[in-house]
Amino acid sequence: MTDTKAGRESAIAQLKTLITGVTDVTIPHCYRHEPRAVYADRYAAIVYRGVTSREMTMGNVMRRFGFDIQVYWQMILDPGTLDTIEKEILDTDVAIETALFTDLSLGGNVTRMVLEEPSTTDYIMVDDVPVARRLTIPVELEELEAESISL
């Protein structure tokens, strides 16, 4: 992959397509930012974490860009609803991971997508009250253009 802005944007667009295209669960929207407020029942975000590693090879830089795929559920403090949310979190984690493994090069826009870190869950609190449940799936997009030059 050529290290270009267009290539990275295409990779993120493909990542959004994979997330919203999962069939086992419904994720109506996927944004490029963390939400400022929890305003919908369920949605996803792709949040940039930064360059997680870089290496120089023959004058070129090989990089890994870190992203978090985050899925949010609005909290309704009803035991039946909370049970449903917990089941959906597990189902969503499996469905997204399965979708990501179908296209590890994100349409040829990255050398490969790396899924090494475990997913996590937490609560989003406002004034000590849980308002949302969040699933975070860390991914890294690897650009190894220099590898093809050095071979």
Image: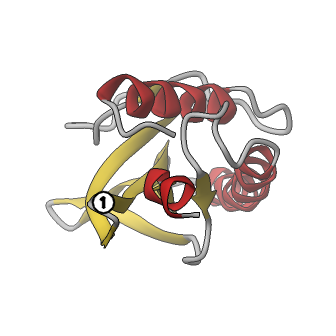
Question: What residue is rendered at 82% in x and 44% in y?
Answer: 102
Quadrant of residue 25 within the rendered picture = top right
Query: Looking at the picture, how far across and down is residue 53, in whole percent?
Result: 33, 72
Pick the residue in front: 108 or 93.
108
Query: Looking at the picture, how far across and down is residue 20, in whole percent?
Result: 65, 27
Question: What residue is rendered at 60% in x and 55% in y?
Answer: 113
Pick the residue in front: 142 or 114.
142
Tell me if 21 is positioned left or right of 3 in this view.
right
Q: Secondary structure at mark 1?
A: strand
Question: What residue is rendered at 57% in x and 53% in y?
Answer: 78
Quadrant of residue 46 within the rendered picture = top left
Question: What residue is rendered at 44% in x and 57% in y?
Answer: 146
The answer to whether residue 8 is above or below residue 53 is above
User: Disc 1 designates what residue?
Assistant: 61
Query: Looking at the picture, how far across and down is residue 134, in whole percent?
Result: 46, 57
Colour scheme of the picture: secondary structure
Does residue 2 show up?
yes
Pick the residue in front: 60 or 113.
60
Does residue 42 show up?
no
Query: Looking at the picture, how far across and down is residue 68, in whole percent?
Result: 42, 56
The answer to whether residue 42 is above or below residue 83 is above
The answer to whether residue 45 is above or below residue 101 is above
Name the amino acid, label 1.
Answer: Val
Q: Residues within 10 Å of mark 1 (few under 14, many from 20)?
A: some
